[in-house]
Image (cartoon, rainbow, N blue to C red):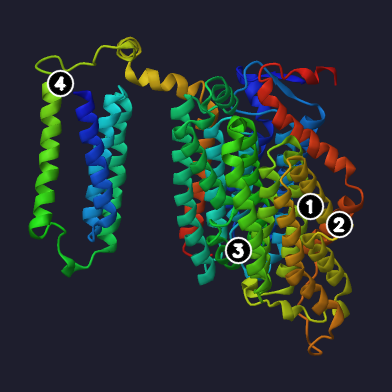
Amino acid sequence: MTQFVFWTLSGVAILGALLCITGRNPVMSALSLVLTLFALAGIYVLFDAHFIAVMQIIVYAGAIMVLFLFVIMLLNVGRPDAGSDVKGKVGKFWAGFLGAALIAEMAAMWRLLPGESFRLPAGTLAGLTAQRGAVGLIAEPLFRAYLVPFEITSVLLLAAVVGAVVLAKRKL
Amino acid sequence: MGHLDLSTASGMTLALLPEVMLSAWAFALTLYAGVRHRDAVDQRRAGLIALAGLVATLIVVIWMWAADVRSVGLPFMMALDAFRWATSVVFLLGAILTVLLSFSYVDRERLWAPEYYVLLLLATVGMMFMGSGLDLIVIFLGLELMSVAVYVLAGINRRSPFAAEAALKYFLLGAFASGFFLYGIALIYGATGTTNLTLIDYQLRSLGLGTNLMLLIGAAMLLVGFGFKIAAVPFHMWAPDVYDGAPTPVTAFMAAAVKAAGFAALVRVLLHALSGALPAWQNIVWWLAVLTILVGNLIAIAQRQMKRMLAYSSIAHAGYLLAAVASGNALGAGAFLFYALAYTLMTIGAFAVVAMAGHNGERDLLIDDLTGLARRRPWLAIGTAIFMLSLLGFPGTAGFMGKWFILQSILQAREHALAVVLVAGSVLSAGYYLPVVMVMFMKPPVSETAHEQVAARGAGRLVVAVTAICVLLFGVWPNPALDLARSGGHDLASSPQAPVSSTSGAER
């Protein structure tokens, strides 16, 4: 079952990525990317990385993609007469397939975790998670073993902010 | 201080002292730039602050090198070896020369943005992490820190459409290359279960992963990522346009320090972590080196613009450095360090001349525009001649010694064909370095007013003088620098065999 879910999610992720780079309409591309990100979040769940999965959806599929769509719509990149990508029989078929894939995912989830047992699957990681909480499991290595990379990341973000301000300043 | 335990907070802080110091300096400079950014005086002061920070960090690095600080216990995140100190010195030297070169340049081109110096410092911090990271994640973050800062520096002249094109091109291809790099890290993690370079080496040897497909694909992805950063053929397409469009001091910084940083990380990853898979990557690096030497030199001959010619010449020099890497031994790592130092000096010197002789971004400075420079500006012409001859590898210059040591390491590895290609490439390069010397010395100026706008003054003159003298000095008296470089190469190649017992420096 896990195998089936993994391959389904992988297929959906690759399909979303392909649609993202082949689509004519930028809005459509952005939405395909959301699909890929959701499928990846599902794969993270299979790895017992629930926290990462939730973060993936909140940060990437949520915040960052909303910004993407904002920018696309503000700049009005797509030609208005280009219309939607969901055109013709092929387009409708893909749309239907994607919807069906999502429903299949949900159905698979229901079958995998029936009834009230919506809790973590048994295993070593799950035991630890129950003990420490999912966030604690992430925080421990992040702020101990990987403290140095974490701090370099903050310097990197500062460099990016300074750079963005310099490039976007009104006058030089 | 002697020995540091990197698992403790104080040990790690001390091990990170140069990087922390330069970052803190960059933060302070950011604050200064936020408050004072009105006129040329503020700009100049920001440059001086940056210069002071770089020099102070250089002193700290040299002090830690002289104190022979080593780590005890398991290797963790940051390396404490001579290779790290040597690369840090090269990057800091490159950054110091770039700042000196920038003073009069930003004045002339009216680049009123003190953040220029902030980004320069942050890029240098990133380079130092690339040279010192003992973990693929640290190396990757250092690479990104350097790249993000340099993307912006390339496009900091917002009035120039060519600079904008250069920045965008560099950014898009750089981001693409980072993707390859990250994917390579993920695959290597998948194969070995760690991102620590020493542990990767241990796993590779103990599990016999030398022919493991996942590891090899990961290593290949890393090579592609590095190939973009060091502009090796066939990943060099972006380099001429970007070098051409960026402000000249930034171009010098990119051609010298950024390239050296990419190489430092490449050498550390290949010789430290992946030395167990040497047969697999040696062939690839061999071909990269041959292609880069030949293509870089052949295209450079056809160039008429000074800046573009130097861009292709820097591609050819990446080929020589790759040849040192392809030797795959400690001698090669030492030769790389020495050549990186020599190359940094002569490249920044050559670009300093371009910055002084040209104007408006120097895109239009042709080689023929230097005709008769020796009559009007004899000292500048002599300096230029020294840089050109050193880039060519003329005996008596640092470039010659560098190439000599690379040849030595190649011959030790019994790669005779590669040695032939390297020498042939050097001969080819005479076809574009010597005409520069020729037009300067053997032809009269085209008009009475020629070279009047050539401004050899202030810090720029200092850069040319210092680099020219150092190039000559290392050419006739290379031993001290070479010994230091060799100790760096030796540290790198010997540390995997004894990851825990790196306490042998205790007697010193």
Q: Is residue A120 above or below residue B173?
A: above
Alpha-carbon distance for marks 4 and 3?
56 Å
Q: Which residue is label 2 attached to?
A: B397
Residue at image point 26% right, 37% down: A10
Chain ID for label 1?
B
Looking at the image, is mark 4 or mark 1 nearer the viewer? 1
Please tell me how many numbered marks the rendered image carries.
4
Looking at the image, is mark 4 or mark 3 nearer the viewer? 4
Q: Label 2: few (<14), some or many (≥20) within 10 Å?
A: many
Q: Is residue A135 above or below residue B468?
A: above
Residue projecting furthest to the bottom: B447
Q: Are marks 4 and 3 on the same chain?
A: no
Q: Are marks 3 and 2 on the same chain?
A: yes
Alpha-carbon distance for marks 3 and 2?
25 Å
Looking at the image, is mark 1 or mark 3 nearer the viewer? 1
Residue at image point 28% right, 30% down: A43
Alpha-carbon distance for marks 2 and 4?
72 Å
Q: Position of residue B254 (x, y in %)?
A: 63, 55
Chain ID for label 3?
B
Which disc, if any, is residue B243? 3
Q: Position of residue B285 (x, y in %)?
A: 61, 46
Say left or right for A53 vs B403.
Answer: left
Which numbered disc, 2 or 1, marks the residue that appears first in the sequence? 2
